[in-house]
Amino acid sequence: MFSRLLSTESDADRAARRFHKHRQLLRTQFLQMATTSGRPRGLRWSRCEWLSECVLARDSEPGQFSLFTGVNVWFEAIEGGDMEGVEAVSMVRDGCAVFHYRNGRWGSGGRVLFNMSPLRAAEAMSECTPIVLPDNAGEQCS
């Protein structure tokens, strides 16, 4: 157990480095999942802007982490759908994209928590504890 406590910060650093190394592929996979999810109903994703703000959080299971990164998302109404003609459709939505680190690999189900900053999202998840990384940790999401 003591060795697990000693290695926890190292595990977090390793997870953050892996996210940074594979972030372009992870973002692409995220967008594929998000755009095919059918959510929000009646809308099609038209653009996603990745923000530099991110929070790494330790999950309740040892060696598992979640990463919340800020996004701005734009939608278009699907022709013939309920949202067609609704003025608010064209407004930018802020939120955070959610990624999970399990068994040494990052992945995502394409989930966005709208109207939440990455820190607020991490704090709202009962199974997550935000981790403070070194000052250069912002590079992990850029």
Image (cartoon, grey):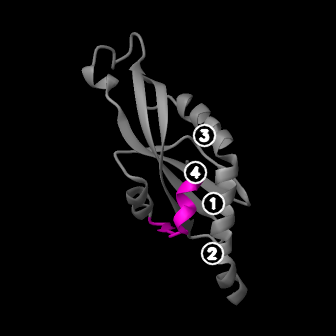
| Circle 2 residue | 9
- Label of residue 99 in the image: 4
Depicted 70 relative to depicted 91: above or below: below
Foreground disc of the pair 4, 3: 3
Question: Can you give x and y, in whole percent of width and height, for residue 102 in the image?
Answer: 68, 59
Q: CA distance from mark 4 to mark 1?
A: 11 Å
Under mark 2, the amino acid is Glu
Q: Disc 4 on helix, strand or loop?
A: strand
Q: Distance of mark 1 from mark 2, alpha carbons?
A: 11 Å
Distance between mark 2 and mark 4 Cα atoms: 19 Å
Residue 122 position within the rendered picture, expressed as x and y whole percent measured from the top left: 45, 60
Q: Which residue is mark 1?
A: 16
- Please report the bounds of the magenta region as a residue range: 126-140
Q: Of marks 4 and 3, which one's residue comes earlier in the chain?
A: 3
Residue that appears at 60% across and 46% down: 108
**Label 4, residues with CA under 10 Å away: few <14, some 14-19, many ≥20:** many
What type is the residue that disc 1 sits on?
A: Ala
* Residue labelled with disc 3: 27
Category of crowding for the residue at label 2, using alpha-carbon neighbours closer than 10 angstroms: few (below 14), some (14–19), many (at least 20): some
Local crowd size for mark 1, using a 10 Å CA cut-off: few (<14), some (14–19), many (≥20):
many
Front in this rendered view, residue 135 or 102 = 135
Q: Going from the N terminus, do you reach mark 4 or mark 1 first?
A: 1
Which residue occupies the extreme front position in the image? 136
Mark 3 belongs to which amino acid? Arg
Disc 4 marks a residue whose amino acid type is Phe
In the current view of this chain or complex, which residue is farthest to the left? Answer: 87
Q: Are marks 1 and 2 in contact (CB under 8 Å)?
A: no
